[in-house]
Amino acid sequence: MEEVRVDLRTRRTIKAIKGAFSQLVLEKNYSDISITELAKRAEINRKTFYLHYSSLDDLVNDIEREIVETFLKSIEKELSELDVAGCISKFYHYLNDCDDVQKKLLCDTDYTFFYDNVTTMLLESKPFKAFYENKRHPYVVKAYCVTITSIYKSWLVNGRPTPIDELIDYTCDLILHGYDGANL
């Protein structure tokens, strides 16, 4: 019985830490977030934070892993059948449905490291490796991912000037057929 209570307390503490971090992400750049401020916001002391995470980077790595797992779980049923267009569509819809914190972490220039880490984790995951590993130049896939996200970020920054499905079609056309072959 004691073990369940400790587990519940641990889960509540981690939830408080992540909740405080989410609030701070919306208010500040990563370099301006301190563990002292995070602990205060989570209503814990610094020692409690360090019981669960070795650093702020460790917390961020945990959040990155959660996002990757959530995204992979959201597409796992159709992943083996997805082509490039299907991946773009799923990824854009996923980004579009994210909460404000996830959008900032994945799309804000102050959090580029976060997006880079999530992209690397996705591309290192078993399903995505199977998707691109047999290509002649697998590193190009990562460049495409960066391009795909850059297009999405530009769409956000410009106030979402077109419906998301039009953006997806346009991006797929551009990525699959190149600049000269796309219906621009």
Image (cartoon, helix red, strand yellow):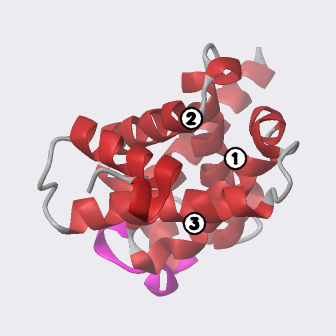
Asked if disc 1 and disc 2 are in contact, CB closer than 8 Å, the reply is yes
Whether residue 18 appears in this view of the structure is: yes
Q: Residue at x 39, y 42 (%)?
A: 92
Magenta-highlighted residues: 21-35
Return the x and y of residue 80 as percentages of the image width and height: 71, 20
Return the residue at label 1.
122
Q: Residue furthest bottom?
A: 32
Q: Earlier in the sequence, mark 3 or mark 2?
A: 2
Q: Quadrant of the C terminus?
A: bottom left
| Residue drawn at 29 percent across, 50 percent down | 183
Looking at the rendered structure, which numbered label has been put on residue 114? 3
Query: Could you say which is closer to the camera, residue 2 or residue 118?
Result: 118
- What residue is rendered at 27% in x and 46% in y? 167
Looking at the image, is mark 3 or mark 1 nearer the viewer?
1
Question: Tag 1's secondary structure?
Answer: helix
Mark-to-mark CA distance, 3 and 2: 15 Å
In which image quadrant can residue 94 be found? top left
Residue 53 vertical position relative to residue 74 in the rendered view, above or below: below
**Helix or strand or loop: what does disc 3 sit on?**
helix
User: Along the horizontal axis of the image, is 79 left or right of 109?
Assistant: right
Q: Which percent across, then down, holds residue 179?
A: 41, 63
The residues tagged by marks 3 and 1 sit, at their Cα atoms, a distance apart of 12 Å
- Could you tell me which quadrant the N terminus lies in? top right
Q: Which mark is residue 71?
A: 2
Q: Nearer the viewer, residue 83 or 32?
A: 83
Residue 81: say if magenta: no
